[in-house]
Amino acid sequence: MIDVRRGADRYEGGDPSAGISTRHAFSFGSSYDPDNLRFGPVLACNEEQLAPGAGFDEHPHSHTEILTWVAEGELAHQDSTGERGLVAAGDVQRLSAGSGVRHAERNDGDRPLRFVQIWLAPLAAGGAPSYEVVRGLPDATPYPLPAAGATLHVRRPGAGERVAVPAAERVYLHVVRGDLRLDGEELGPGDSARLTGEKDMVAVAGSPGELLILELP
């Protein structure tokens, strides 16, 4: 089964007056939708845009794997474990909240910041928080998320290039930039597809693009 969700149908969030624009793919906060709570372990997929100087002050998380992909600009991160630093475009950041962690995310640069943040439920609750950044994740290099039983694949196809979709129990595909065709559907920036029990699926890029593909249990 393939369930295509359009970026234009995402729930609006954030605080535009504070320079924060958020588009939620799943039920979130005041945008409660009982029919769109999660997909397998995926609890949230948020497209975030922060103006220079804008950001999220320190706030708590627990029992969540938080995956962040920076598309443009630099994200300033700090958390209660003492980790801090900048996450640039092409970097992938993982924060395992474990039994509890606090973190803040800001755009301390002088140009707009755009990133995609995905929350996943861990296979087992609790544990100590942990943090990792992989700089410049190469195309088609799998990034495992063992605590959630998932694997991230980042693909940057050229125009006309074919991208094989993993034959997992579930797959979540998010288009960061570019456009592609998947099983007869045209997908563009912000669009996503939720695949269940599909095999031998191939996405064909219509233009140079960037895709996040999550292989899920």
Image (tube, grey):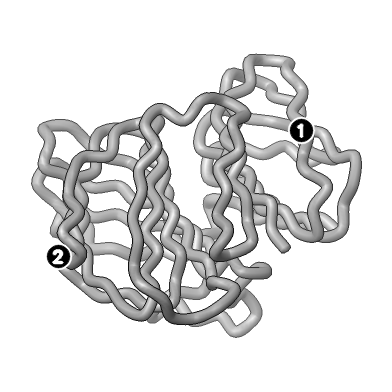
Task: Kindly identify the residue that appears in the image at 55 percent across and 55 percent down.
Answer: 145
Question: Can you give x and y, in whole percent of width and height, for residue 34 in the image?
Answer: 60, 84
Q: Amino acid at mark 2?
A: Asp
Task: Kindly identify the residue that appears in the image at 73 percent across and 16 percent down.
Answer: 160
Q: Return the residue at label 2.
A: 57
What kind of element bears circle 1? strand
Question: Can you give x and y, in whole percent of width and height, for residue 167 in the image?
Answer: 83, 47
Residue 155 versus residue 26 in the image, above or below:
above
Question: Can you give x and y, in whole percent of width and height, for residue 99 in the image?
Answer: 36, 80
**Which quarter shows the C terminus?**
bottom right
Question: Can you give x and y, in whole percent of width and height, for residue 30 in the image?
Answer: 39, 81
Task: Kindly identify the residue that appears in the image at 34 percent across and 68 percent down.
Answer: 129
What kind of element bears circle 2? strand
Quadrant hosting residue 90? top left
Residue 124 versus residue 48 in the image, above or below:
below
Q: Residue furthest bottom?
A: 34
Left or right: 184 with respect to 173? right
Residues under numbered marks 2 and 1 in contact, where contact means CB atoms less than 8 Å apart: no
**Which quarter shows the N terminus?**
bottom right
